[in-house]
Image (cartoon, grey):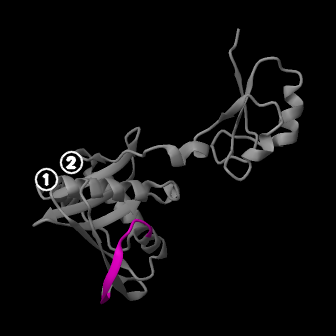
Amino acid sequence: GLDGLLLSPVFDSESPGAGAAIGAKKFAHLLKDIDTPVFALGGIDQANVQQLVGTGAAGIAGISAFADNFEIAAIKLDDSFAQKLTELHRQNFSTSWPKADFSAHIKNKYDDVLGITCAGDLHGFIITRCQGGQMEILTLVTAKQKRRQNLAHALVMQAQKMAIKRGADIIFLEVARDNIAATALYEKLGFIRYGTRPGYYKTAQGRVDAHLFQKRLTRV
């Protein structure tokens, strides 16, 4: 009486419960003795999905395979997240902010503390300040194990929506010269570099320059 089955993992998967991949060839062989529609699951991406063509799969299932098509939602955080904000910030920066600082940002009427959460866990956050028609991104953090999942992109885009909602027409930010990934993200999102602050960031390896970026906003 089943409508369909999931057979997994077809390809190598990072899911905690995934076992050894069976591969497209064995997947097709197993389907020969199954009358019920079977959906392929596990490790499917744009690079390997073509291998399933002709296997008899009724379709594909997954999370990562479709992640780029989901709108990741960033929500406004309240003070109950102050400790988690502190811990996540500490994991990413040598000079971390105290819990009181995050509580102050949450309570400040000019600031927005936006985060991406799942089952109470904090996967990333962005803090912005908007005054006088200008917004500044104060910090942006994503959990190391959640990188390359478009979280930072989603956070910046939500911050941009908040900037427009608050009446801002320009966003400013600064990023360490050696933070290649962040620089690439901001450039992809249309931020333009307009200056440098020499030795702005203090790190364990010494002082690092900060590159200054800005983006003009267009209201629709």
Answer above or below: position of 128 versus 194: above
Instruction: Provide residue 21's location: percent of width, then percent of height.
Output: 78, 43
Local SS, label 1 = helix
Q: Which residues are magenta?
A: 188-199
Instruction: Provide residue 87's location: percent of width, then percent of height.
Output: 35, 58
Q: Quadrant of residue 27?
A: top right
Pointer 2: what residue? Answer: 79
Q: Assess whether mark 2 and mark 1 are in contact (beta carbons under 8 angstroms).
A: yes
Answer above or below: position of 102 versus 201: above
Residue 189 lies in magenta, yes or no? yes
Q: Closer to the N terminus: mark 1 or mark 2?
A: 2
Q: Are there few (<14), some (14-19), or many (20+) residues within 10 Å of tag 1?
A: some
Cα distance in 3D space between marks 1 and 2: 8 Å
Q: Which residue sits at x=68%, y=46%? A: 13
49 with respect to 54 (left or right):
left
19 with respect to 119 (left or right):
right
Residue 136 lies in magenta, yes or no? no
Q: Amino acid at mark 1?
A: Lys
Magenta stretch, overall SS: strand
Q: Which residue sits at x=39%, y=54%? A: 154
Answer above or below: position of 32 versus 49: above
Local SS, label 2 = helix
Q: Which residue sits at x=34%, y=63%? A: 140
Tag nearer the camera, 1 or 2: 1
Q: Residue furthest front?
A: 220
Q: Quadrant of residue 136?
A: bottom left
Pointer 1: what residue? Answer: 107
For the N terminus, which image quadrant? top right
